[in-house]
Amino acid sequence: MLKDAGFDEVIAEDRTEQFIQVLQKEMDAVEKEKDNFISDFSEEDYNNMVSGWKSKLVRSSMGEQRWGLFIAKKKD
């Protein structure tokens, strides 16, 4: 797709494992501070956020959701 858009030097890296690690780290941090989070926001916000992270972790682990890094250059 990037080449079709006129880019000739294209590097694509699968960063899904990094995505999973970041999600897990963020979720662990928020779960440790659950009471503080709920006092600043709401329990509904907390549940929605954690539920979303868990869903992303499942999809990523199953290969249904990927995270990529794309670097592309166009000739002048």
Image (spheres, grey):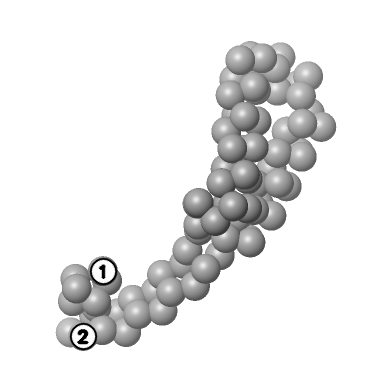
Report helix, strand or loop for mark 2: loop
Report helix, strand or loop for mark 1: loop
Q: Earlier in the sequence, mark 1 or mark 2?
A: 1
Residue 7 placement (x, y as % from top left): 24, 78
At 43% from the left edge and 74% from the top edge, which residue is drawn?
12
Q: Nearer the viewer, residue 63 or 20?
A: 63
Q: Nearer the viewer, mark 1 or mark 2?
A: 1
Picture quadrant of residue 43: top right
Q: Amino acid at mark 2?
A: Lys
Residue 51 placement (x, y as % from top left): 62, 29
At 70% from the left edge and 17% from the top edge, which residue is drawn?
38
Q: Which residue is mark 1?
A: 1
- Tell me, yes or no, whether the two marked residues, 1 and 2, touch with CB atoms within 8 Å: no
- Residue 43 shown left or right of residue 16 in the figure: right
Question: Residue farthest to the right?
Answer: 32
Q: Say above or below: 31 vs 42.
A: below
Quadrant where the C terminus sits is bottom left
Q: Which residue is mark 2?
A: 75
